[in-house]
Image: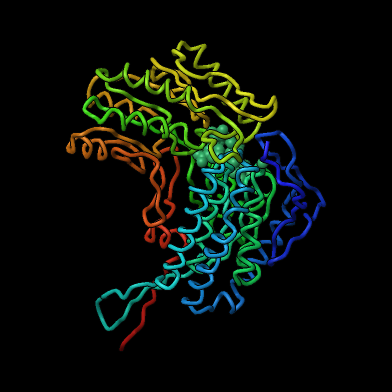
Amino acid sequence: MAGTIEGLPETGVWIDNASHPAASGETFATLNPATGEVITRVASGDEPDVSRAVDSARAALRNPAWGRIDPHERARLLWRLAELIEENADELARLETADNGKTWFESRKVDLPQVVSTFRYFAGMADKVHGETIPVPGPFMNYTRREPVGVVGCIVPWNFPLSLASWKVAPALACGNTVVLKPAEETPLSALRLGELAAEAGLPPGVLNVVPGFGTKAGAALVQHPDVALISFTGSTETGRLIVREAAGTLKQVSLELGGKSPNVIFADADVGAAIRGAASGIFYGKGEVCAAGSRILVERPVYDEVVDALAERAASLTPGDPMARETRMGAIVSETQLERVLGYIDAGRREGARLVAGGRRHDPGGRGFFVDATVFADVTPEMTIAREEIFGPVAAVLPFDDFEEGIELANRTIYGLAAGVWTRDVAKAHRFAAAVDAGVVWVNTYNRYDPATSFGGFKASGSGRELGMKAALEKYTREKSVWVSLA
Ligand code: NAI
Ligand code: MG
C-alpha cells in the first residue's frame, strides 16, 4: 500500500519558529491507519512544553514585529502563508492522508483548497478589524476598540486535522492574537508542517506554536494555563464537558464545536435521486468521521423503500481501499480504537433489531489497516443506540416518518444540534423546516457545504460559539473595549 511516507524524520514541538524535543524527551508513534505501520515518532508535549509555548506566544504579543504590526502587513503575511500552503499542497495532502487514512481525493481536492481559501479569506479580514464610535449623551465621546484577546489555545481533533486547525488559526491570527495549537495525537503531522510554513511566510517567532501530545497532558495543560485567554476547541462532547470544567479554574473563555447526530430529512416531494446521492455522501463522506455527518436519515413513508434500497446499493459500491490511490473514495478509519467503536455500534444496531441492508463488517483489503464497509441500517427506531449516539463512522441509521410534524419531531429528538439537511421541492416547507429545526447549520437540497465567509457551529450538546465568518471571528477572537472621552 502506497500510504507510507519514506524517511519522514522524527518531529519535535514547534516553539519560537524552531523544533525542539519535548522537555521530558518522550515521543509517541503516529500510525498510518491504512497499514497499521508507524509513520514516524513525534515529541510528546506536556505541561513544561505548553508553558514554554505560552511564554513564547505571550512574548510575541509584546514583540512590535507582531503586536504593533501594520494591519496591511499582517494581511500580507497571512496571504503569503496561504500561498505557501498552496505550493506545498501535495506534500500536506500526503501527510494528511498517511496520518488520518482519508482519501487523497479528500485531502488534496477538498481539504487543502479549503485550508488555502480560509487563510486567504482571513488575510482579507486582517486590516478590517475595527471598533465603532457610539453616540452617547453629554459632553462625551465614546468609541470601542477591538483588541486581540491574547494567547489563543486551539485544540483540534483528528478528522480534519489541517482544515479545522485553519478554521481557528487563520481568524485568530487575523485578529492579531498569537496561538498555541494542539493537534490530535492521532494526526499531528500536518499541523507541525503548518508551523514551519508559517515561519517561512515570515510570521515572527511565537506567533504560531504547535505542541503535539496527548489530550490529558498537552491538551489539559493548555486548558489550565492561566495565560491562555481563550480555548477554541473542536472534538467530542465528552471532552468538551471536561474542558469547560478545567477552564473554570482560570475563567478563560471557551468556544466549543462538538459532536452531532445530524438529521438528513427526505420528504416524498423531493427530487429523490438527488436526495439519495446527498444522503449517501452526507454519511459516507470522510468515512462518516465528520462532526456534521448526516447520520440519521429520516425518510417520508411513500419514498422510504426506494431510498433504503438505493442507499444500500450505493453503500455496497463504496469499497474502502488504499487511501493514497487517486480513485479511492473511501479510506481507512483513523485508528484501531475508533474502528472498535464503530464495530461496537454496528453490533448494537444488530442486537437492538435494526435491519442491516448493507455493510456491517470490518473490511480488510491487505489483512492490515483499519477499514470498515459502508453500512446502512433500516427500520431504526429513535430509542436505538445507533439513532442516539454519535458513531463517527460510515454507518447510516434510516428511520421512516409520516408527515411534516413527525419529521421535525424526530429531527429534533436528540441531545445534539449541529447540522440538518432537508430535501423537498416545496419552498415553503423547506423554510418552515429550516426555522423549526434545532441545528446551527441547515442545508436545503444539499449537504456538507462550508465556506470561510459563513459561520458554522452547533446548538445544545453540539457546542457554543461559531467558527468562520467575519462577524463570528470578530466576536470570538477580539475583546471589545469601550473608551469614554470627556469633551468638556
Ligand atoms: P477527543 O474530543 O477526546 O479529542 C479531540 C482533541 O481533544 C484532541 O486533540 C485531544 O488530544 C484533545 N483532548 C482530549 N482530552 C482532553 C482534555 N482533557 N483536555 C484538553 N484536550 C483534550 O476525541 P477522541 O477521543 O479522539 O474521539 C472520541 C469520539 O469523539 C469519537 O469517536 C467521536 O465520536 C467523537 N469526536 C467528535 C469530533 C467532532 O468533531 N464532533 C472530533 C473527534 C472525535
Ligand atoms: Mg496517525
Name the quarter where the C terminus is drawn: bottom left
Q: Can residue 392 be seen in this view?
A: yes
Snapshot colouring:
rainbow
**In the depicted view, which residue is nearer to us: 114 or 182?**
114
Q: At which x and y percent is residue 320?
A: 56, 29
For residue 101, what is the image quadrant? top right
x%, y% of residue 252? 54, 56
Residue nearest the observer in this picture, 273 or 48:
273
Q: In this view, does 387 lie above or below 8?
A: above
Ligand 2 sits in quadrant: top right
**Residue beneath the point at 38% across and 52% down:** 455
| Depicted 204 relative to depicted 222: above or below | below
Residue beneath the point at 31% across and 19% down: 306
Q: Is residue 291 rendered to the left or right of residue 223?
A: left
Viewer-proximal residue among 339 and 325:
325
Would you place residue 18 above or below residue 431 in this image? below
User: In this rendering, does residue 236 appear at all?
Assistant: no
From what the image shows, is residue 395 above or below residue 6? Answer: above
Please count the marks in the image: 0
* 46 relative position to 233: left or right: right
Query: Where does the image place residue 400, in percent across and percent down from the top left?
Result: 32, 19
Image quadrant assignment for residue 476: bottom left
State the residue at coordinates (24%, 30%): 270
- Which quadrant: the N terminus? top right
